[in-house]
Structures are given as C-alpha cells and as structure tokens.
Image (tube, rainbow, N blue to C red):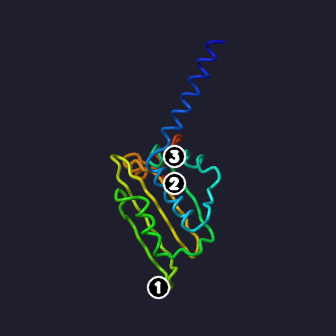
Amino acid sequence: MRFRMRQLALLMLGSALLVSTGCSAADHDFNSVVSAVEHKYSVHAQRIPMMSLVSICARLKTHGGVRGLRVVQFDNLHGMDGKDLYPLLRSRLGDDWQPFVTEVSGGQNRSGDQSVILVRPDGSSMGMMIADYDHGELDLVGMEMNGAALSKWLHNPERQQHSPHPRNPMGD
C-alpha cells in the first residue's frame, strides 16, 4: 500500500513537472498576441480542438523538429485594417522577434490582406509566429523549431520514419 502511494505521488509530481516545463516563452508570446487581438477588437479566438494532440504528433513525426504548435482563428474581425497587423505583432512580441516574411496585397483596398512571419532565434531552436489577415479573418500560428532535428527530417523524411517502407524492387 505504501509503495502504491509513493508511485502515485511520483506520477503526480512528474505530471506537474511536464505541465510546468511546457510553458515556454513562445507560449507567453503567442498568448500575448491572442490577448491583444481579443482586447483591441472585442473578439474571441477560436481555438482548434485537440491542437495539443496535433502538436504532439508534429513533434513525434519531425523527431523534435517542430514543437509547441499553437493555432487560433479570429472570424468577423471587423475594424482591423490589414496594415495594423505588423505593428500589433511587433508591439506584443518585442525586439527579439525579427521579420522573416511580410506580404501585403489588396492594392488600393485599405483592408487588404497581409501575411507576416516573425522568427526569434533561441540557441539551437527558433520560435516562429505566422499571422495571416484576409478580409476580416485572422489566423495565428505559433511554434518552436529545432534547427538540427528539422533539417535532418527535411533532408530525408522517409529514413526518419519509425517504420521504414519496404523498397520497391523495380526501383520506382
């Protein structure tokens, strides 16, 4: 009985440690952007159901190359101008985050589309924030990427699978 209590206590402690280490700076930055959009435009983010499971699958499939995947969507985001997206991201993320891609379309349309990718180097990994505004809809994606693991997987994804596919004897 005493042994089972000790096992239960260790299991609870391990679970608490896993949950606490899962909260990274990238989580804080992502949540800060989501909160800023919610407050500024009086909307609520639609979170993707079971995103934690998708994040775990991405981490396993890429052997740690992608982790901490987070996705939210804002629908009916009226009052936001496409040109407001980049300044909003920069104000919430800070100087550690650098622009990687910024695309604005829509011509004369004041509420044109805008896509922004910001990155934050962090040792051997890199944080990435992707924001896409398209006529009243905003999608936000946040993730952490391990450069070495992701590069290894990208260069040879078949070899990195857990169960390799049998080779085709015809060489196709």
Three-letter amino acid code at disc 2? Asn
Question: Is the C-beta separation of discs 1 and 2 under 8 Å?
Answer: no
Which residue is disc 1 drawn over?
107
Measure the C-alpha gap from mark 3 to mark 2. Answer: 25 Å
Sequence-first disc among 3 and 2: 2
For label 3, the crowd category at 10 Å Cα-Cα, with few meaning under 14, some 14 to 19 and many 20 or more, is some
Three-letter amino acid code at disc 3? Lys
At 63% across and 17% down in the image, what residue appears? 5
Residue 78, position in %: x, y? Answer: 59, 74
At 45% across and 51% down in the image, what residue appears? 26
Question: Residue 61: which disc?
Answer: 3
Relative to 165, residue 76 above or below: below
Relative to 50, residue 8 above or below: above
Which residue is disc 2 drawn over?
31
For label 1, the crowd category at 10 Å Cα-Cα, with few meaning under 14, some 14 to 19 and many 20 or more, is few
At mark 1, the secondary structure is: loop
Q: Nearer the viewer, mark 3 or mark 1?
A: 1
Three-letter amino acid code at disc 1? Gly
For label 2, the crowd category at 10 Å Cα-Cα, with few meaning under 14, some 14 to 19 and many 20 or more, is some
Judge left or right: residue 79 versus residue 99: right
Q: Which of these two is toward me, 67 or 33?
A: 33
At 56% across and 32% down in the image, what residue appears? 15
